[in-house]
Image: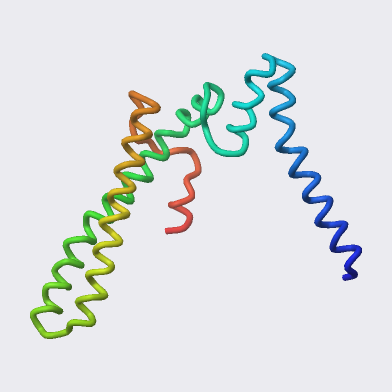
């Protein structure tokens, strides 16, 4: 490929992305005025803040909670096994193995904290949502 062809591809991709990011801001400007242009751009680029993004997030909150519960269950079953293996490695005089297991335990504990924080945030944003399985869930296809 020539440099000219590569540059043309890069320019076309950047043009499409800038158009895609500008479209929600323009639509929000036509509907409600310039006050929502800033919030429209923030939601399209950064995340859900506002009524439009909030309702969409709450519609999928049950599926997300179910997935997070599944992760939390797996972590809570793996932690005692790893802690027991760490204690056994320490008592049998294998300090390197014990250190590796301790790192894995701390990573899992950090992950467990993050998962519980995420569950709390979802429950605060969408009160009354219970964990549910969605239509076609991707974890079942990857298992």
Percent from the top left, x then y, of residue 83? 16, 66
Q: What is the residue that sits farthest to the bottom in this orientation? A: 93
Percent from the top left, x then y, of residue 121? 36, 35
The residue at 68%/21% (across/down) is: 28
**Left or right: 116 in relation to 81:** right
Picture mark count: 0
The residue at 72%/23% (across/down) is: 27
**Left or right: 81 in relation to 127:** left
Q: Is residue 2 above or below residue 32?
A: below
Q: Is residue 129 above or below residue 120?
A: above
Q: What is the residue that sits farthest to the top in this orientation? A: 32
Identify which residue, 69 or 7, lies in the foreground.
7
Residue 130 appears in which quarter of the rendering? top left
Residue 20 appears in which quarter of the rendering? top right
Q: Quadrant where the N terminus lies? A: bottom right
Identify which residue, 135 or 17, lies in the foreground.
17
Q: Quadrant where the C terminus lies? A: bottom left
The residue at 32%/54% (across/down) is: 111
The residue at 16%/62% (across/down) is: 80
**Left or right: 83 in relation to 58:** left
Percent from the top left, x then y, of residue 142? 46, 58
Q: Is residue 21 above or below residue 142?
A: above
**Left or right: 111 in relation to 9:** left
Q: What is the residue that sits farthest to the left in this orientation? A: 91
């Amino acid at each position: 490929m020539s440099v000219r062809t590569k540059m043309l591809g890069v320019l076309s991709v950047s043009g499409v992305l800038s158009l895609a990011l500008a479209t929600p801001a323009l639509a929000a400007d036509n509907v409600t005025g310039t006050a929502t242009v800033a919030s429209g751009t923030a939601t399209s680029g950064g995340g859900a803040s506002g009524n439009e993004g909030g309702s969409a997030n709450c519609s999928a909150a049950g599926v997300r909670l179910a997935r997070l519960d599944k992760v939390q269950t797996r972590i809570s079953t793996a932690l005692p096994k790893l802690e027991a293996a760490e204690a056994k490695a320490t008592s049998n005089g294998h300090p390197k193995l014990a250190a590796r297991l301790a790192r894995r335990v701390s990573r899992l504990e950090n992950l467990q904290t993050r998962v519980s924080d995420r569950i709390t945030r979802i429950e605060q944003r969408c009160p009354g949502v219970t964990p549910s399985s969605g239509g076609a869930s991707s974890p079942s296809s990857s298992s």
